[in-house]
Amino acid sequence: MTAALVPDEPAIDPAINHPTRLAVVAFLSACDEAEFAAVRGGCQVSDSMLSKIASALEAIGYLAVRKGYVGKRPRTWLSLTPAGRQALALHIAALQGIAATARKAGAEAGEAPPGATDS
């Protein structure tokens, strides 16, 4: 499989734009590697949902899957690849840019922030 083409500038990434996929990628961004069960619990998704997300992200090169054993019990560990980390950083930067642009437009339109009162 080849890695997805990650742009050099902030851009919404359709591969991680869905909230559940974004949660999985964000969870994994905080660690080097996490056991499947920890990701499942942390993101509050089912085994089948996480398995589908992991397969899709692995296919585009954003996620690495490692299988092994702890004692006699099989385990699966997930980790973000460098391309996955870069994609998340650019995706978040794009979202922040959208929010900043909207705030600026609102301020220029003279809208008061929520909870502001006229004195």
Image (tube, helix red, strand yellow):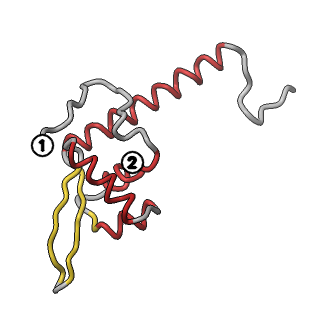
Q: To which quarter of the image does residue 66 belong?
A: bottom left
Residue 118 rendering spot, x and y as whole percentages: 85, 26
Which residue was labeled with disc 2?
Answer: 21
Q: To which quarter of the image does residue 111 belong?
A: top right
Mark before the other along the chain sequence, 1 or 2? 1
Under circle 2, the secondary element is: helix
Circle number at residue 98: none
Q: Are marks 1 and 2 in contact (CB under 8 Å)?
A: no
| Residue at left offset 71%, top offset 29% | 113
Q: Residue furthest right?
A: 119
Which residue was labeled with disc 1?
Answer: 1
| Residue at left offset 53%, top offset 28% | 99
Amino acid at circle 2:
Arg
88 versus 6 height, above or below? below
Which residue is nearer to you in this view: 53 or 33?
A: 53
Amino acid at circle 1:
Met
